[in-house]
Image (tube, rainbow, N blue to C red):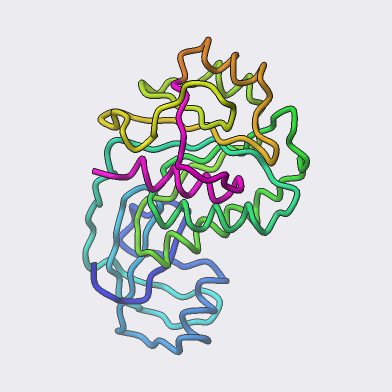
């Protein structure tokens, strides 16, 4: 991918001429001071990469024409992480940013018995994911779900490979040693870990108990450690 300025457009990008949204137009024209004839990259966050040329350099309604259109393949297998919301929202936001950069494809904010924070600013969280996608120059935006209960996530999990990371003194295998050849889901608990009943529920549903290392990690650190270990090829 060339190092042209890179922007996200959530709308239909099938047209040959595209009018950029007001915020994007302002950034292109007023901040970057781009002019008619200059090129930029666009993505819809669903794998499409567009190189376009500015045809109308208006600060509110910048228009571009498509020069080249391609599709970036989605990384396989897909990694999904269900991770407890945190009392400190900035730490959860840090996780979202880094997980997006790593290439996690699905993020599920998790509500457990010990989850202390249940407020979820969906628009802000989505913006963080978009910024991280663009910064890392990817064309796939992770699917960010609304907060879901642990029971719901366990019941609806369809991934062939399902893991739960916990800290209880019972048999667990290192995550990085597990089979990673198919779509994967990893459960990460809150500060204070999952309850014994929650762990048992996941194990009964076919989740594999795993450890992320020899040290006890904060929730957001555990999420990133898990994402990295699952991304090993």
Quadrant location of the N terminus in the rendered image: bottom left
Residue at (56%, 76%) from the top-left corner? Answer: 60
Work out whether 85 lies above or below 186. Answer: below
Q: Where in the figure is residue 16, as x and y percent of width and height? A: 30, 61
Residue at (51%, 12%) from the top-left corner? Answer: 205
Q: In front: 133, or 226?
A: 226
- Describe residue 100's horizontal placement relative to residue 196 as left or right: left
Q: Where in the figure is residue 163, as x and y percent of width and height? A: 45, 27
- Describe residue 137's horizontal placement relative to residue 219 as left or right: left
Work out whether 3 lies above or below 48. Answer: below
Q: In front: 7, or 52?
A: 7
Q: Residue 134 sits in which quadrant?
A: bottom left
| Residue 229, magenta (yes or no) | yes
Q: In front: 60, or 7?
A: 7
- Describe residue 47's horizontal placement relative to residue 225 as left or right: left
**Residue lying at the far top of the rendered structure:** 204
Residue range of the region highlighted in magenta in the rendering: 208-233
Quadrant location of the C terminus in the rendered image: top left
Q: Where in the figure is residue 56, as x and y percent of width and height? A: 41, 80
- Describe residue 156's horizontal placement relative to residue 141 as left or right: right
């Amino acid at each position: 991918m060339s190092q042209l300025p890179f922007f996200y457009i959530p709308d239909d990008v099938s047209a040959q001429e595209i009018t950029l949204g007001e915020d994007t137009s302002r950034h292109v024209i007023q901040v970057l001071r781009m002019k008619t004839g200059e090129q930029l990259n666009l993505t819809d966050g669903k794998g499409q990469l567009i190189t376009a040329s500015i045809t109308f350099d208006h600060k509110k309604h910048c228009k571009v024409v498509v020069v080249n259109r391609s599709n970036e393949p989605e990384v396989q297998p897909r990694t999904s992480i269900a991770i407890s919301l945190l009392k400190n929202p900035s730490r959860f936001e840090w996780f979202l940013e880094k997980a997006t950069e790593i290439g996690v494809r699905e993020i599920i904010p998790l509500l457990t018995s010990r989850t202390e924070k249940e407020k979820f600013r969906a628009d802000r969280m989505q913006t963080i994911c978009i910024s991280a996608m663009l910064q890392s120059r990817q064309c796939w935006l992770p699917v960010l779900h609304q907060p879901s209960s642990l029971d719901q996530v366990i019941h609806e999990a369809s991934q062939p490979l399902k893991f739960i990371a916990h800290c209880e003194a019972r048999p667990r295998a290192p995550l990085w040693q597990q089979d990673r050849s198919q779509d994967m889901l990893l459960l990460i608990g809150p500060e204070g870990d999952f309850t014994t009943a929650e762990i048992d529920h996941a194990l009964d549903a076919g989740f594999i108990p795993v450890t992320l290392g020899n040290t006890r990690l904060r929730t957001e650190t555990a999420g990133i450690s898990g994402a990295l270990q699952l991304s090993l090829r």
